[in-house]
Image (spheres, rainbow, N blue to C red):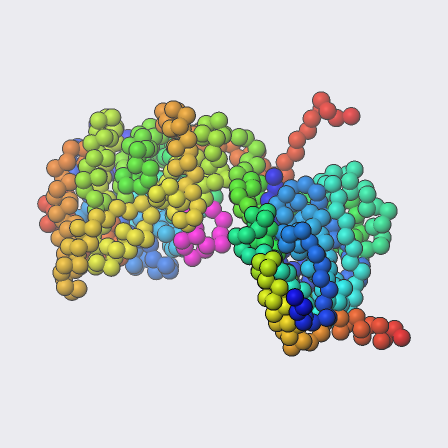
């Protein structure tokens, strides 16, 4: 899923200061699962903002709404009938949701309430970790199911580099060396011989380097 | 390994069966060329070629290529170090051609320390290619006379290509397979990480030799004299992938502070003398960090002076 | 057993402090409460294993938010006691009451009263 992190409330306060009527808009998908932008977080942020402005004698209308998804026309249409009731929207969706909402409601200022961090997994209670950088051409079949693009600080395709120590990355003792994990898994799969296959120069044109990416499916287009 | 592929003096010496000697010179953190020239002159007659580091430890410095040109113009043969951290495949290929235009005949291909260690911790890293893919790229440009994109190169770069190897980093079991991979990707010489644990290094060389790797590429053992017990401890504890045995630290600690530097030189000389006899070791890469003036003493006392005429 | 406790707070009963969500605490302040304290079982004695640990985390989160919005994180507190400790409950209530009185009314309540007065 897409992993996001709540923005500090002070930052949001600064952004909304000049608006009188504000909608806090949550999303029921990834950001709900990573506990940063779902219905609960919408309630909390709205309550906190109301208190902040009331305590300063500057009461605002701050309302709450959480959509099934902000990355889909269908659900975003749900707020069209009330859109003129608000001077601004604080979206707690990922960067995709914020932009898609902004595209739809051209004249309503949109403020992101979270920082979009990565594509990752819920590794443990309160711990979300990166697993994919959407490079657009998956090599996991050749790397023991562990991704050097997202999990090696140098994106080394033929690793590990000389900085691997006791299974950890040179940038921090808290970061696993992706290539140690790859070697371990290749061993477990009895495929360590594959290690010596040289990974060819990667085609990064499917990565962000190739410009904004699209998937077009003529077979499902109507 | 007898036909010469380039005009490199280092290649000639190694292929003639001599023990090769290289050292390194870190470009200054400024634009004064005199510093490069001064370091070059100090070691000129004691080594076959001088590595010029590429923004080592991710600290911004004078460009490796420019410093190489200064050395080359003084008649010193440089080894251009290039890291994949800062440049994409366009810039790398372009710099390779730039180096070749000055007839810089050697290159060492590296991934480079992560930028978080340097003065631009907030910067991007590139890693469009990795170090092995850079080796492949240079070999492709030289041997096929083509760019990665497939077009012909007019006057392809004639460059003797090396890679680094760390015999000590984890996981140890793939250290030799990794060396094999670097050689398979086209590395003709290998300069290793600083060696302090001779037994482990010998084991690595032996395993490499068993696989025939020492016949396919020249292994140059990395040597760094220690200036003090403090440096020894720092190397042991803080530098990733470094193996400094406790006895060495104890030996350094056992001499008075003002004698420690000399002790460090002595250790380095003893290590070179011991490793000279090891089959599969083709040369030494002496990295006297900000201590270039000691290289002549180390080379002489190790019995590696005068350097052979290639 | 009759114990004297301050009469100026309202008790909201929950099956477990793990049921208390961050928003419940914030809403209480939004509605004008001067302080909120949550009384849970002894740590390690939760019937649902970790309900009171979750509550503690949420109290900490609430305190942080209250600090940031200018209400003051010291107005919210978590206590732990076992079900037989009536006197201790009374003592915690007195302690909390004294602390809140010392802090004075919550800025939200002050602002709301001012609003009412201005409107009148």
- Pick the residue in front: A3 or A136: A3
Can you name the residue that lies furthest to the front here?
C1
Q: Quadrant of the N terminus of chain B?
A: top left
Circle count = 0
Magenta: main secondary structure equals: loop
Residue at position x 54%, y 38% in the image: A132
- x, y percentage for residue B104? 32, 42
Q: Which residues are magenta?
A: B114-125
Left/right of residue B63 with respect to residue A37 in the rendered view: left
Residue at the spot 75% in from the left edge and 71% down from the top edge: C109
Provide residue A67's location: percent of width, then percent of height: 75, 44
Give x and y (percent) for residue B306. 12, 45
Q: Quadrant of residue B221?
A: top left
Q: Which of the pair A140/A166 is nearer the observer?
A: A166
Q: Quadrant of residue B158?
A: top left
Q: Is residue A8 left or right of residue B167?
A: right
The residue shown at (12%, 42%) is B274
Observer able to see residue B309: no
Q: Residue at x 22, y 39 (%)?
A: B201
């Amino acid at each position: 899923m897409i992993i996001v992190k709540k923005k500090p409330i002070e930052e949001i306060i600064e952004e909304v200061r000049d608006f009188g009527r504000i909608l806090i808009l949550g999303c029921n998908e990834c950001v709900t699962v990573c506990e940063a932008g779902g219905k609960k977080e919408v309630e909390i942020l709205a309550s906190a903002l109301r208190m902040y402005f009331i305590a300063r004698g500057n009461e605002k209308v701050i309302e709450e709404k959480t959509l099934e998804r902000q990355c889909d026309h269908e659900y975003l249409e749900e707020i069209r009938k009330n859109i003129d009731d608000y001077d601004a929207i604080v979206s707690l969706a990922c960067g995709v949701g914020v932009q898609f909402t902004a595209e739809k409601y051209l004249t309503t200022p949109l403020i992101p309430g979270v920082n979009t961090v990565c594509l990752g997994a819920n590794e443990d209670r309160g711990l979300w970790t990166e697993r994919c950088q959407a490079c657009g051409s998956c090599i996991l079949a050749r790397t023991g199911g562990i991704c050097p693009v997202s999990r090696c600080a140098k994106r080394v395709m033929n690793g590990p580099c000389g900085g691997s120590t006791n299974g950890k990355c040179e940038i921090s003792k808290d970061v696993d060396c992706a290539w140690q994990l790859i070697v371990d898994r290749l061993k477990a799969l009895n495929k360590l011989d594959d290690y010596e296959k040289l990974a060819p120069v990667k085609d990064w044109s499917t990565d962000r380097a190739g410009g904004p990416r699209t998937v077009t499916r003529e077979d499902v287009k109507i | 390994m007898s036909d010469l592929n380039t005009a490199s003096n280092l290649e000639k010496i190694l292929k003639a069966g001599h023990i090769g000697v290289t050292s390194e010179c870190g470009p200054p953190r400024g634009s004064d060329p005199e510093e490069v020239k001064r370091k070059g002159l100090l070691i000129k007659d004691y080594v076959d070629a001088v590595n010029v580091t590429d923004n080592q430890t991710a600290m911004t410095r004078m460009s490796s290529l420019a410093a190489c040109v200064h050395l080359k113009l003084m008649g010193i043969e440089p080894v251009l170090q290039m890291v994949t951290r800062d440049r994409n495949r366009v810039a790398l290929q372009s710099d390779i051609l730039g180096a070749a235009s000055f007839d810089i005949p050697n290159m060492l291909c590296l991934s480079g320390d992560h930028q978080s260690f340097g003065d631009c911790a907030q910067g991007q890293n590139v890693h469009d290619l990795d170090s092995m893919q850079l080796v492949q790229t240079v070999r492709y440009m030289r041997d096929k006379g083509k760019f990665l994109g497939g077009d012909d190169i007019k006057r392809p770069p004639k460059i003797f290509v090396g890679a680094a190897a760390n015999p000590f980093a984890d996981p140890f079991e793939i250290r030799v397979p990794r060396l094999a991979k670097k050689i398979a990707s086209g590395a003709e010489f290998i300069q290793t990480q600083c060696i302090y644990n001779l037994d482990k290094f010998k084991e690595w060389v032996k395993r490499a030799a068993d696989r025939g790797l020492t016949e396919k590429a020249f292994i140059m053992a990395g040597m760094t004299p220690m200036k003090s017990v403090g440096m020894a401890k720092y190397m042991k504890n803080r530098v990733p992938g470094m193996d400094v045995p406790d006895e060495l630290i104890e030996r350094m600690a056992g001499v008075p502070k003002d004698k420690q530097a000399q002790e460090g030189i002595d250790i380095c000389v003893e290590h070179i003398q011991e490793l000279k006899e090891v089959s599969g070791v083709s040369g030494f890469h002496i990295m006297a960090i900000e201590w270039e003036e000691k290289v002549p003493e180390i080379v002489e006392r190790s019995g590696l002076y005068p350097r052979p005429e290639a | 057993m009759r114990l004297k406790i301050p009469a100026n707070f309202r008790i909201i009963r929950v099956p477990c402090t793990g049921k208390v969500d961050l928003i419940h605490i914030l809403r209480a302040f939004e509605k004008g409460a001067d302080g909120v304290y949550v009384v849970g079982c002894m740590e390690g004695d939760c019937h649902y294993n970790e309900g009171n640990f979750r509550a503690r985390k949420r109290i900490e989160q609430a305190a942080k938010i209250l600090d940031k919005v200018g209400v003051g994180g010291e107005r919210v507190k978590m206590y732990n006691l076992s079900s037989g400790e009536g006197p201790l409950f009374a003592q915690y209530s007195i302690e909390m009451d004294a602390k809140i009185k010392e802090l004075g009314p919550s800025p939200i309540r002050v602002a709301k009263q001012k609003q009412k007065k201005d409107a009148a």
